[in-house]
Amino acid sequence: MKSPKILLFDIETSPNLAWVWGKYEQNVIEYDREWFVLCWSAKWLGSSKLLSSKLNDFKLYKKDKYNDYEVVKSLWKLFDEADIVIAHNGDKFDIKKTNARFLFHNLLPPQPFKSIDTLKIAKKYFKFNSNKLDDLGKHLNLGRKMKHQGFDTWLGCITGDKKHWNQMIRYNKQDVRLLEEVYNKFLPYIQGHPNLGLYARESYACPNCGSTKLQCRGFSHTKTNVFQRTHCQDCGAWSQFRKCEKKFKSDIKN
């Protein structure tokens, strides 16, 4: 049974370097250097192996400390393998930022994939005091983001300090670990999740996790149809058979 390749990922970017007249709410006069990708971390769902890449991993770094081509290209290769991509605030930030660098470096789009944004899920199905990844991890007893030295960590990477680079990649990897924990916690609540049963060519499978351990429990009703309802014994998600049990016609219209 073929399983879809599900990629969890997170990127860290540099700040912009620009000319401004003041400190607060400024219009940029001119950019001296626009943002670029410092590093990324990722893992395939269910795998224990963490993947990562940062600027100073490549020989190009010695020639140009701000050229993220090799880092971006290595992430492109993962995207090109993925069926589904998961990130926290990925639809608004990580995926769009990554696409911007793909385009900048003249890389063609990777193969099409579905995206799952855990920030959108948190906002849609729950009412937490905070939807930040660190706060979700703390509140749900799943773990925390790694502490760092604030902007000094980013500045240290830009200036080439190895200590800060090592701290940055550890911070980045922990984000991905925590992302997976939060995603798995949310999983049974996600309606409209990409149907993993379709990837496996399995009609009797949980659409959220792909498990075939389904228990028939009651029926769901529309105005004209009745469907067998199922409950996944692995992830806990509810679903229903696509084939209706009964079909009714009525002369009464609302």
Image: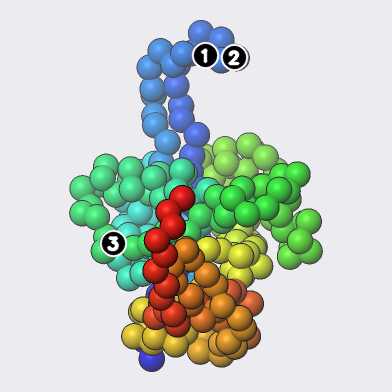
Mark toward the start of the polypeptide (3 vs 1): 1
Residue type indicated by callout 3: Pro
Figure label count: 3
Q: Nearer the viewer, residue 209 or 8?
A: 209
Q: Is residue 15 visible?
A: yes
For discs 2 and 1, the disc positioned in front in the rendered view: 1
Task: Tell me if label 2 and label 1 are in contact, CB under 8 Å.
Answer: yes
Question: Quick check: 214 above or below 13?
Answer: below
Q: Nearer the viewer, residue 27 or 217?
A: 217
Residue with the mark numbered 1: 26
Q: Residue at x 78, y 64 (%)?
A: 141
Q: Residue at x 51, y 89 (%)?
A: 212
213 on left or right of 141: left
The image shows residue 45 at horizontal and vertical percentages of: 51, 74
Q: Is residue 60 visible?
A: no
Q: Secondary structure at mark 2?
A: loop
Q: Residue at x 35, y 54 (%)?
A: 72
Q: Secondary structure at mark 1?
A: loop
Residue with the mark numbered 3: 112
Residue with the mark numbered 2: 23
The image shows residue 209 at horizontal and vertical percentages of: 52, 77
For discs 3 and 1, the disc positioned in front in the rendered view: 3
47 on left or right of 199: right
